[in-house]
Image (cartoon, grey):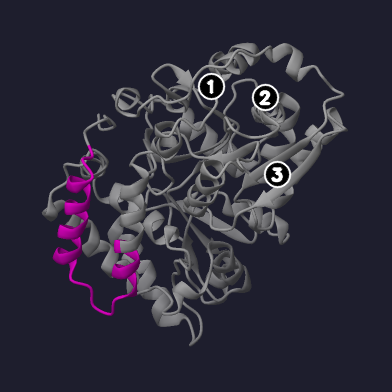
């Protein structure tokens, strides 16, 4: 896998956590430990909630006296999570652990000195050496590790209902898919589908999925524009080029797209009301929970222009400094990298394990193909900004708002929104950190 990182990220995110002396071995081997473990996460959809509960059951078995509380914060992509847990932490009610994306998403916490250093835990579990290339760097700030990865997902995928395609005589495309082929496919579906069924959807009731689609479309148009965008130097003309394609994409989207969450749109794909959906591969867990099988019930292809690219979304857990049962947070963080937990969680979640020692022969057909693509030196692996890694949190929140306005306008002015986005990047002081284009 081509390294995810050639950047100065670690030099611009302020380190804030003080290093606290702790005997990691004694903590992890204390199987009689008690107290609470509040685990905050955003996995609420079918399949993914089963995955996190199976993982938590491992901790319950190893530490039977610990009271494990699974606190699901709906919303996905971490937007709601950041607001919730930061308020909890600054008011003295920090949970023992919570889910986060590495990179810029953890900046608000490290800036405020709210996260515990996990350097000792990383060393004890040999995490850096066990991880796939390019991931460890994203989990540290100025030499201090703050997060432990639990799973990897691919972002730039379009999913489709095979039964719907067959019913209306539509042939799915073969990889690689060009934009011309994709528009022809959309137009064919639009002509053949009856009233009440739609070609595409966003499922953007909480906004982030519209940004997710914008991100993938941007990479499909130009990796250089993508790099310029996350480095804060994209021109108005470059952003307008992306928005122009996005505007055409929106012609085929269900008009009530803001009425649904992402997994509700997945349910509409399952029900045969939506033909295609641009979404990350966490959707596989939802389809599996409904009994669907890849290749029989649903298919997938890369977003046009991205067949040799992998938009990476990494799920991790962090440990706040001020929780009342901080040692239980460390126990959970350690188990995120545990081989037994990785086996149970990865197979239920449909994710790629971040660890080299995961037996790849246990992946299903589609996940194995994604893993092989991720590891290929020919693949351009790029960090997601929709999922918190590649842009500062305050910029991402503004971007969510701008894109929501764009997708809900009847005839959005492409250049107006391009200027607003370029201005947002400039005013936030986004600096060049990323080098992803060959």
Q: Which residue is mark 3?
A: 52
Camera-side mark, 1 or 2: 1
Q: Residue at x 47, y 70 (%)?
A: 170
Q: Is residue 48 magenta?
A: no
Give, as a single range, the part of the protein colored magenta. Answer: 402-430
| Secondary structure beneath label 1 | loop
Question: Which percent across, then down, holds residue 375?
Answer: 48, 27
- Image quadrant where one finds the N terminus: top left
Q: Earlier in the sequence, mark 3 or mark 2?
A: 3
State how many labels appear: 3
Magenta-colored segment: predominant secondary structure = helix
Q: Is residue 18 above or below residue 405?
A: above
Q: Which residue is mark 2?
A: 334
| Secondary structure beneath label 3 | helix
Q: Which residue is mark 1?
A: 117
- Image quadrant where one finds the C terminus: top left
* Quarter of image, res 263: bottom right
Q: Residue at x 63, y 37 (%)?
A: 97
Q: Is residue 29 above or below residue 153?
A: above
Q: Residue at x 59, y 51 (%)?
A: 42
Camera-side mark, 3 or 1: 1
Question: Which percent across, then down, holds residue 156?
Answer: 42, 49
Please indicate whether residue 405 sits to the left or right of residue 432 in the image. right
Question: Which percent across, then down, holds residue 53?
Answer: 75, 45
Q: Is residue 324 above or below residue 412?
A: above
Question: Which percent across, then down, holds residue 427?
Answer: 18, 47
Distance between the alpha carbons at the discs numbered 1 and 2: 13 Å
Camera sees residue 293: no
């Amino acid at each position: 896998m081509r390294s995810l990182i050639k950047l100065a990220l670690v030099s611009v995110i302020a380190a804030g956590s003080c290093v606290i002396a702790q005997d990691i071995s004694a903590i992890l081997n204390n199987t009689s430990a008690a107290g609470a473990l509040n685990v905050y996460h955003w996995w609420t959809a079918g399949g993914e909630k089963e995955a996190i509960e199976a993982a938590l059951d491992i901790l319950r078995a190893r530490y039977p006296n610990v009271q494990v509380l699974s606190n699901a914060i709906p919303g996905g992509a971490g937007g709601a999570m950041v607001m919730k847990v930061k308020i909890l932490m600054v008011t003295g009610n920090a949970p023992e652990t919570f889910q986060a994306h590495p990179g810029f998403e953890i900046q608000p916490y490290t800036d405020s000195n709210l996260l515990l250093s996990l350097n000792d835990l990383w060393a004890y579990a040999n995490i850096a050496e066990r991880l796939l290339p390019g991931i460890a760097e994203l989990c540290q700030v100025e030499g201090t590790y703050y997060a432990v990865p639990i799973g990897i997902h691919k972002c730039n995928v379009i999913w489709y209902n095979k039964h719907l395609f067959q019913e209306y005589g539509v042939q799915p495309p073969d990889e690689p898919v060009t934009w011309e082929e994709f528009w022809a496919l959309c137009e064919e579906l639009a002509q053949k589908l009856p009233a009440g069924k739609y070609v595409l959807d966003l499922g953007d009731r909480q906004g982030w999925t519209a940004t997710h689609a914008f991100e993938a479309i941007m990479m499909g148009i130009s990796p250089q524009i993508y790099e310029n965008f996350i480095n804060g130097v994209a021109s108005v003309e470059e952003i307008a080029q992306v928005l122009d394609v996005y505007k055409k994409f929106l012609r085929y989207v269900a008009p009530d797209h803001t009425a649904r969450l992402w997994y509700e749109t997945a349910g509409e794909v399952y029900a045969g009301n939506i033909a295609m959906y641009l979404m990350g591969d966490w959707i596989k867990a939802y389809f599996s929970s409904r009994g669907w099988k890849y290749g029989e019930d649903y298919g997938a292809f890369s977003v046009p222009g991205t067949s040799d690219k992998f938009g990476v979304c990494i799920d991790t857990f962090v440990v706040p400094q001020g929780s009342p049962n901080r040692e239980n947070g460390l126990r959970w963080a350690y188990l995120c990298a545990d081989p037994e937990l990785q086996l149970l969680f990865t197979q239920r979640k449909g994710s790629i394990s971040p660890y080299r020692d995961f037996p790849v022969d246990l992946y299903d057909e589609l996940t194995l193909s994604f893993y092989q693509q991720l590891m290929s030196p020919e693949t351009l692996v790029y960090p997601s900004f929709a999922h918190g890694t590649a842009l500062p949190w305050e910029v991402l929140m503004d971007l969510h708002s701008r894109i929501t306005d764009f997708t809900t306008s009847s005839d959005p002015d492409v250049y107006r929104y391009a200027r607003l986005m370029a201005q947002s990047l400039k005013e936030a002081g986004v600096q060049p950190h990323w080098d992803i284009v060959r």
